[in-house]
Structures are given as structure tokens and as C-alpha cells.
Amino acid sequence: MNSSLYYVIFSIILLFGLVTTLIIGFSRKNREGDQTYFQKTGVKWVRLTAFYVISIAAGIIALIAFIWYSF
């Protein structure tokens, strides 16, 4: 596989993450504030940690695939 394909895929993922983060951050609900935000924080931490674990695992798999197909 051509290594530039990996750069394109990586760039698309980064841009998608940036755009969705900005959309969520500047949403009306976030600007007005949410009174229930600080309730059930345990569930939110578990969900956030799960997203990070999945993202890191996917990144490691992508790195291994990149190294494997580069040689």
C-alpha cells in the first residue's frame, strides 16, 4: 500500500475530530449551560475513558498496520 494513503486517512480522521469538537463546543446548549452537567459524573468519566481506550487501541493498530505494510 502507498504510505500517502495512510496520511490521507489520518488527516481525515483528525479533521473530523476537530470539526465535531467545534460543533459540540459552540452548540447552543453548551453556550447556555446545562444545570444537570455535574450530575452523574461517574458515568461520564467511564464513557470518556472508554472513548480514549478505543481511540488509543485503534491508533496502535493503525501504527502496526503502517509499519507492517511499509516493509
Image: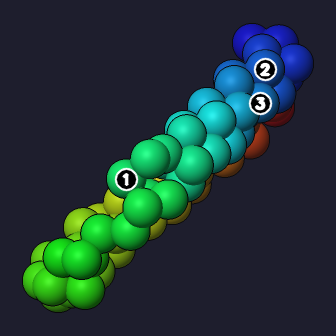
The image shows residue 4, relative to residue 44, as above or below, that is above
Q: Quadrant of residue 44?
A: bottom left
Picture coordinates of residue 13, whole percent (x, y): 63, 33
Badge 3: residue crowd in 10 Å (few <14, some 14–19, many ≥20): few
Image-based side of 10 in relation to 64, left or right: right
Find disc 1 in the rendering and name its residue.
29
Percent x, y for residue 5?
A: 78, 16
Query: What residue lies at 15% left-to-right and 85% top-to-bottom?
Result: 39
* Residue drawn at 77 percent across, 30 percent down: 11
- Between 20 and 6, the one lying in front of the other is 20
Placement of the N terminus among the 4 image quadrants: top right
The residue under label 1 is which amino acid type?
Lys
Q: Residue at x 55, y 40 (%)?
A: 23
Give yes or no for contact between labels 1 and 2 (Cβ–Cβ under 8 Å).
no
58 or 22: which is nearer to us?
Answer: 22
The label on residue 8 is: 2
Residue 53 visible in rendering:
no
Q: Quadrant of the C terminus?
A: top right
Q: Could you say whether the residue bearing mark 3 is in a helix, strand or loop? A: helix
- 3D distance between C-alphas at marks 3 and 2: 5 Å
Q: Is residue 13 left or right of residue 29?
A: right
Q: Nearer the viewer, mark 1 or mark 2?
A: 1
Numbered tag placed on residue 18 in the rendering: none
Report the front residue among 66 and 22.
Answer: 22
Q: Earlier in the sequence, mark 1 or mark 3?
A: 3
Say which of marks 1 and 3 sits in front.
1
Q: Secondary structure at mark 1?
A: helix
- Residues at marks 3 and 2 touching, judged by CB atoms closer than 8 Å: yes
The residue wearing badge 3 is 11
Q: Amino acid at mark 2?
A: Val
* Residue at 44% from the left image edge and 47% from the top image edge: 28
Give how far apart the Cα atoms at labels 1 and 2 are.
33 Å
